[in-house]
Amino acid sequence: MFAKAFPVKSNPAIKGSDRRKLRADVAAAFPTLGTDQVSALVPGKEELNIVKLYAHRGDAVTVYVCGGNPILFELEKNLYPTVYTLWSYPDLLPTFTTWPLVLEKLVGGADLMLPGLVVPPAGLPQVQQGDLCAIALVGNRAPVAIGVAAMSTAEMLTSGLKGRGFSMLHTYQDHLWRSGDKSSPPSLAPPAPDAPDVNEEKGSVQADPALQGDMRRLTLEGEDKENGEVRQQMCGEKSLSEAAEDPGVRGLNPDPTDSKTLQEQMDELLQRCFLHALKCQVKKADLPLLTSTFLGSHMFSCCPEGRQLDIKKSSYKKLSRFLQHMQREQVIQVEELRSGVESIVAVDWRHPRITSFVIPEPSPTSQTIQEGSREQPYHPPDIKPLYCVPASMTLLFQESGHKKGSVLEGGEVRTIIVNYAKKNDLVDADNKNLVRLDPILCDCILEKNEHTVTKLPWDSLLTRCLERLQPAYQVTFPGQEPIVKKGKICPIDITLAQRASNKKVTVVRNLEAYGLDPCSVAAVLQQRCQASTTVTPAPGAKDSLQVQVQGNQIHHLSRLLLEDYQLPRKYIQGLEKAPKPSKKK
């Protein structure tokens, strides 16, 4: 439902009466929550907003946002928890388990098929058709998706775990999740396996233990009829057991099987990207190198697919602290060449940490999966200025077959004006560079106080004609049909704003006009700037979003838009507001 970006209709703060009604609705929808838990989910004093939006299929959705995170959403008068809420209350819904590779498909908008389920030793949870369910990954109880069961548990088992199992509503990493703080699922240990209850009351729904065991084998094994061998059912081109062990797959979430903490795993990833960048990308000629450039242009590009380098989740918390640690190990030398700006000025490429580092090679299967799922690289659109004929100039253009509203290119306008002058014998006989003005030309291009003007040079005539035509433009995105719009294309607008806390934020608007997804741009900036980002409705603009980044990040935006996205500078305004370099003392 939220696989694509959605326009926000309104975002008001909740009223006291609506807050009390929401508490009552939550208690009714989720009776397993106690009074204290309902009060914690819908607090009495914290800021709570009601966001009205339209999903990409046209569904009207109401989202309740608390503390910057969406906690609940309402669709057709039904209340649903988000993954942020389920991470605090993981047992709120019956939970089914799938493999990490399947999550990628769910994020793209696919429903969960029954062959992707993993049957635990205690059997599948008992649900009926239409029940709301949570989906978790193997080894981690934290839900990553919610959906509606397409059939009962008994029907799932009877079908041999074939067919569509769940209609998905919301997933981790979709655009509803992106509207929050984009935190990763916590690592929650799976529940201890319980023996199936063989003393259930007569008449209750209970799966045959033998059938449950058969279903587990069907999930994990498939018989190879050609060679008689039993092989693991493949997920993509990798067996399920291999997929669970592959570091590239585990990187979608913290590795639940790794004994190291999330912080320790992030420390290892940080050092791996650091050494990889020094060994493969940075050359002596690049020095001195700004530490921010080293991080944004080199370390991030060395991060394995499916993993996200986040220094704030490491023990170092800041890049400067990590680089100081590497300097104490004599791997690099860092100096403050300008006030407040650090640069790497020397690297010991003979240091054992660098020479012993082995560049990891992704497995062919991992590459196949990544190549199939990776978003297409951004290519800027081709933007062509056009001109629209207004009512006041129809007489000038009607001889060439054009009427009011006709859209022309600049070259076509020039040809029409030249042909009109020649056809009506308006070229001055004594000076071919001048054009005599007839009544039609006078009405079209002269001001009221210019009644004495009888001749104009060619360039002045053409310039005046273009100025009096209405502006339009044509945008052509790669592989798509051209789109013609009236008016001038709005440039990407970059501004600096001062918040109540006296901190500056960088605000970027009009990204959609150039085919850029604000949520994707925000994710890139969050990594490059190592600063918090938010995507909010742009004030005064219908169905448009703006990106806010903490601090003055115009230097990063300049590199991203001009160098990475290859957008022409004339379509970007506000780059001059970048912080000026401090003078060397």
Image (tube, helix red, strand yellow):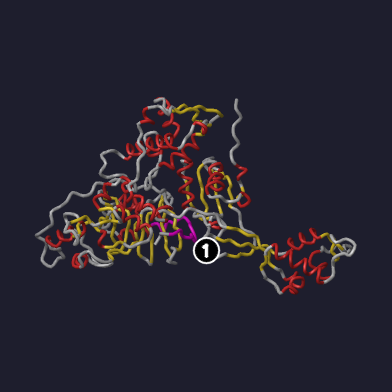
Residue shown at the point (53%, 42%) measured from the top left:
556
Q: Residue 388, position in %: x, y?
A: 68, 66
Where does label 1 land, which residue? 480
Q: Answer whether residue 431 is visible to the viewer in this image.
A: yes
For the C terminus, the image quarter is top right
Tag 1 secondary structure: loop
Q: Is residue 6 left or right of residue 96?
A: right
In this rendering, the answer to whether 361 lies above or below 320 is below
In this rendering, the answer to whether 553 lies above or below 147 is above
Q: Answer whether residue 36 is visible to the viewer in this image.
A: no
Residue 325 placement: quadrant? top left
Q: Residue 390, position in %: x, y?
A: 71, 69
Q: Residue 349, position in %: x, y?
A: 43, 29
Q: Is residue 435 left or right of residue 47?
A: right
Closest to the observer, 474 or 368: 368
In this rendering, the answer to whether 442 lies above or below 297 is below
Task: Kindly give the residue lying farthest to the left in the view shown.
Answer: 199
Q: Is 433 included in the stretch rendered in magenta?
A: no
Report the label total: 1
Q: Residue 106, position in %: x, y?
A: 34, 58
Residue shown at the point (25%, 44%) measured from the top left:
257
Q: Residues within 10 Å of mark 1 (few under 14, many from 20)?
A: few
Task: Kindly give the residue lying farthest to the front in the view shown.
Answer: 227
For the N terminus, the image quarter is bottom left
Q: Is residue 22 left or right of residue 393?
A: left
Residues shaded magenta: 4-19
Q: Is residue 391 left or right of residue 101?
A: right
Closest to the observer, 128 or 349: 349
Identify which amino acid the numbered label 1 is placed on: Gln
